[in-house]
Image (cartoon, rainbow, N blue to C red):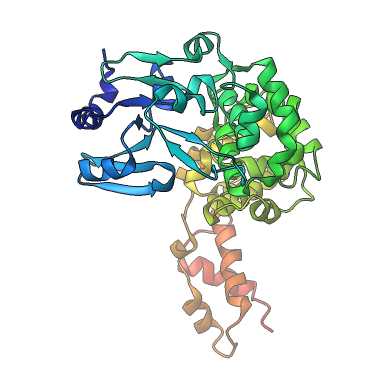
Amino acid sequence: MLPKSFMQAKYIIDTIEEYGHEAYFVGGCVRDVLLNRPIRDIDITTSAPPAIIQTIFPKVIPVGIEHGTVIVRHKNESYEVTTFRVDGTYTDQRHPDSVQFINQLDEDLKRRDFTINALAMDKNGKVIDLFSGMTDLNNKLIRTVGNGVERFTEDPLRIIRALRFSSQLGFAIEKKTLKAMKLVMPQIENIAVERITNEMEKLFRGDSINTGLHYLKETKVYKYLPIMLKYPYIVAEIPKEIKPLHSFGQVIALFHYIERQIPVIAWIKAWKCSNETKHEAHQLTQALTQYEETGLSRWLVYQLDTQFYDGFANLTSILFSENPVRKQDIEKIAKELPIRSKRDLAVNGHDLIQMFPRAEKGPWLQQTLTQLEKKVVEGHLVNKKFSLKEWITCNPPEIN
């Protein structure tokens, strides 16, 4: 019987079969439904060439049509549909130089990375398992389809994917697969950094992160990762038992705290992270430094964006295990803050200019407002215009 989560997507398979072609659910969605895990993307493999798929369905996006992959839109959902294929050589160690479309499911499944990802399922819920993937699921084992050295040489990112799956699923890596990973791992240096970052973010987010880190340390894959190849001891310094880190900003903050001579911006550039990740990493490292110096203060909480409370609390549990911060402690302080931002101050730049009409505009304006902001947040001044102006009169700014 077909699981309920696949019922809407069944229309895609039904339609393809009406036109005389085979189609199956394939890969991660089949693996995850067998493991009772949440299903994210539903992928379909078919004997129908991409040109046929484009004529069958009204909304088709040719995202990777040269490799047989298109996106079919149905009821506001996207389904990746890929034609059965066999791959040529992998000169760029990512994409095959050529693909040959075929009409045999077994040959298509043979080219996939791991047995647990080489499972297919028909529209009635029957699983097609040609490489003992279900046995490996039951044994909680990650094993390549066929020759491990060949699979990893085709795309060395699969080495990091193996680590990532061990972190997400808590699975062991089969001995021959592990040996093949170690043999091929120098080729990781040829992979685009963005692809590595994406996989490593998923690794650190895994529910069984400590299993993933165990294999990261055992294989020494980190010696071929950005920055870590020069500072390999960083991974060894990660505590043995940590909770999942749900963003790469948290990961960078952890790395920076372990080796502080490497600036956050160096991690951001080397790992080619987004501006959002850069902002988060800066916020978290600043908060961690303050916490180490002064504990959980009002000023720390005031400067920390609400969206980073979880990450900060998580990092303190890793780095300050004897005195971690709870999210509710942060929220309690946040509720008691007299202001939420500089805009809430009872005085502003115009007030300061009126108080010092002969002074030229300059850095002193921002410096004075920041002083007031901190004193109000820390409870040393009441946020009333009279009180703030009185303090400024007694403590006039240094105007150059």
In which quadrant is the C terminus drawn?
Answer: bottom right
Q: Which residue is at 37% across, 33% downward?
A: 41
Q: Nearer the viewer, residue 257 or 53?
A: 53
Q: Is residue 280 left or right of residue 18?
A: right
Image coordinates of residue 145 in percent, x first then y, are: 56, 22
Q: Residue furthest bottom?
A: 358
Residue 292 in sight in this render: no
In which quadrant is the N terminus drawn?
Answer: top left
Tell me the quarter of the picture where residue 201 sits.
Answer: top right
Tell me if residue 308 comes above or below residue 126 in the rendering.
below
Q: Nearer the viewer, residue 244 or 184?
A: 184
Tell me if residue 41 comes above or below residue 134 in the rendering.
below
Q: Nearer the viewer, residue 100 or 359?
A: 100
Q: Which residue is at 59% across, 65% downward?
A: 370
Q: Is residue 78 left or right of residue 303?
A: left
Q: Which residue is at 20% across, 46% downward?
A: 58
Q: Which residue is at 55% across, 35% downward?
A: 202
Image coordinates of residue 21 in percent, x first then y, are: 27, 29
